[in-house]
Image (tube, rainbow, N blue to C red):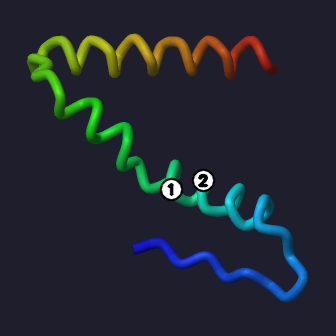
Amino acid sequence: MLIIPVKEGESIDRALKKFKKKFEKTGVVKELRSRQAYTKKSVRRREEIKHAVFVGQMKQAEQ
């Protein structure tokens, strides 16, 4: 359960924005989508490696 403390005088829009950010961090939607269809372990591993290579290239280009 997510609890969002709302300060006195704080707008509802701001509280909603905080809620959305917290909800996204929990990864509920991401997990739900991943469970909709089974992905083989080899495919998942290949995607992880591909992502790691991409991140490494981005960091190297940044320096």
SS state under label 2: helix
In this view, the residue in front, 15 or 49, is 15
x then y, percent, for residue 24 = 52, 48
x then y, percent, for residue 53 = 48, 13
Residue at 9% across / 17% down in the picture?
Answer: 40
x then y, percent, for residue 31 = 29, 41
Is residue 2 placed above or below 47 in the rendered structure?
below
Whether label 2 touches label 1, CB < 8 Å: yes
Is residue 16 placed above or below 1 in the rendered structure?
above
Q: Which image quadrant: the N terminus?
A: bottom left
In this view, the residue in front, 15 or 46, is 15
x then y, percent, for residue 30 = 37, 37
Determine the CA span between mark 2 and mark 1. 5 Å
Residue at 18% across / 12% down in the picture?
Answer: 43
Residue type beneath disc 2: Lys
Q: Which residue is mark 1?
A: 23
SS state under label 1: helix
Quarter of image, res 46: top left
Q: Residue furthest bottom?
A: 8
Is residue 4 placed above or below 62 in the rendered structure?
below
Residue type beneath disc 1: Phe
Is residue 54 placed above or below 35 in the rendered structure?
above
In the picture, measured across the screen, residue 9 lies left or right of residue 52, that is right
Q: Residue furthest front?
A: 12
Q: Which mark is residue 20?
A: 2
Q: Residue furthest right?
A: 9
Quarter of image, res 11: bottom right
In the picture, measured across the screen, residue 56 lies left or right of residue 41, that is right
Q: Which image quadrant: the C terminus?
A: top right
In this view, the residue in front, 41 or 7, is 7
Q: Residues within 10 Å of mark 2 (few under 14, many from 20)?
A: few
